[in-house]
């Protein structure tokens, strides 16, 4: 079945540094990937839509200069949290379209970011 | 904004009890999906319902899509501790894979 891999699963960084999270579709190609943010015991909040070969589409209220998204290939999208601050600490999840035509997405296992 | 109202937000029950989670919207969705998420993991798809009035069963889980495709429910029969997790409904419109998520239902089944 379709698998989406996220790396790293956990990362701790100092305030002011930048952190890159990778989202890979392992056995399928994905022209579109999605990035979400999730706070403890809450639902997923869509941050942006990552489009292969073009600029990402950000949701209202999400700073594009803060959360840089690059989708350079059909199997890889990256999210870079720039100049991270403690309030950026969260669980970040990506998903990718399997191409089944049924609006079914495969989710990664998530990346836990802790900014000290 | 297409909102999906999910209820209840929290549910704590004893093993063996039945429960129902609801997902309601004023908007029509082309499909609606239910996911289960465990702590520290990504959501895992349980089912997709597409046709109004559709009912799907997955062992002790029964999913229903409303006739007007605006609402859905998840019913669990004889809940077990292994059913504990965050249940999320998500709706899609057309061929856009951008899902609208409900706020989730955190289910705890006590042994």
Image (spheres, helix red, strand yellow):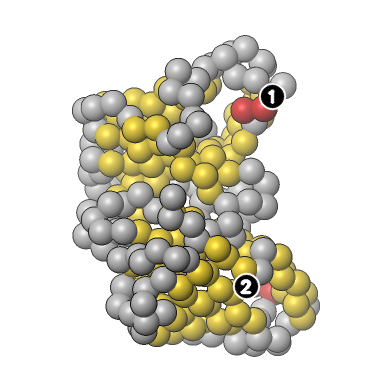
Q: Quadrant of residue B32?
A: bottom left
Q: Position of residue A105 (x, y in %)?
A: 35, 54
In this view, the mark in front (2 or 1): 1
Give the CA separation, mark 2 to mark 1: 33 Å
Q: Is residue A31 above or below residue B111?
A: above
**Residue A69 shows up from this direction:** yes
| Label 1 environment density (alpha carbons within 10 Å; few <14, some 14–19, many ≥20) | some
In the rendered view of the protein, which quadrant contains the C terminus of chain A?
top right
Question: Would residue A106 be found to the left or right of residue B89 on screen?
Answer: left
Question: Would residue B8 be found to the left or right of residue A54 on screen?
Answer: right
Subunit bearing disc 2? B
Depth check: A106 or A61 in front? A61
* Label 2 sits on residue: B83
Depth check: B37 or B6 in front? B6
| Label 2 environment density (alpha carbons within 10 Å; few <14, some 14–19, many ≥20) | some
- Circle on res. B106: none
* Label 1 sits on residue: A86
Question: Would residue B58 be found to the left or right of residue B14 on screen?
Answer: left
Q: Position of residue A33 (x, y in %)?
A: 33, 41
Depth check: B52 or B15 in front? B52
């Amino acid at each position: 079945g379709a698998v989406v891999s996220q790396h790293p699963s956990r990362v701790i960084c100092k305030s002011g540094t930048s952190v890159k999270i990778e989202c890979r579709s392992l056995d399928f190609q994905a022209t579109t990937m999605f990035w979400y943010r999730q706070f403890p015991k809450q639902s997923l909040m869509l941050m942006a839509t990552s489009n292969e070969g073009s600029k990402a589409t950000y949701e209202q209220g999400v700073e594009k200069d803060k959360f840089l998204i690059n989708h350079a290939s059909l199997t890889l999208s990256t999210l870079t949290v720039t100049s991270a601050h403690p309030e950026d600490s969260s669980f970040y999840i990506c998903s990718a379209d399997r191409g089944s035509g049924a609006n079914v997405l495969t989710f990664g296992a998530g990346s836990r970011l802790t900014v000290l | 904004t297409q909102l999906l109202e999910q209820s209840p937000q929290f549910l704590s029950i004893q093993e063996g009890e039945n429960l129902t989670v609801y997902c309601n919207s004023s908007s029509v969705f082309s499909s609606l999906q239910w996911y289960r998420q465990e702590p520290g993991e990504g959501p895992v798809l349980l089912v997709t319902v597409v046709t109004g009035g559709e009912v799907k069963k997955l062992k002790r889980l029964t999913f229903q899509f409303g006739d007007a495709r605006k609402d859905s429910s998840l019913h669990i029969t004889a809940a077990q501790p292994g059913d504990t997790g965050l249940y999320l409904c998500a709706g899609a419109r057309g061929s856009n894979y951008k899902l609208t998520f409900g706020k989730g239902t955190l289910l705890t089944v006590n042994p």
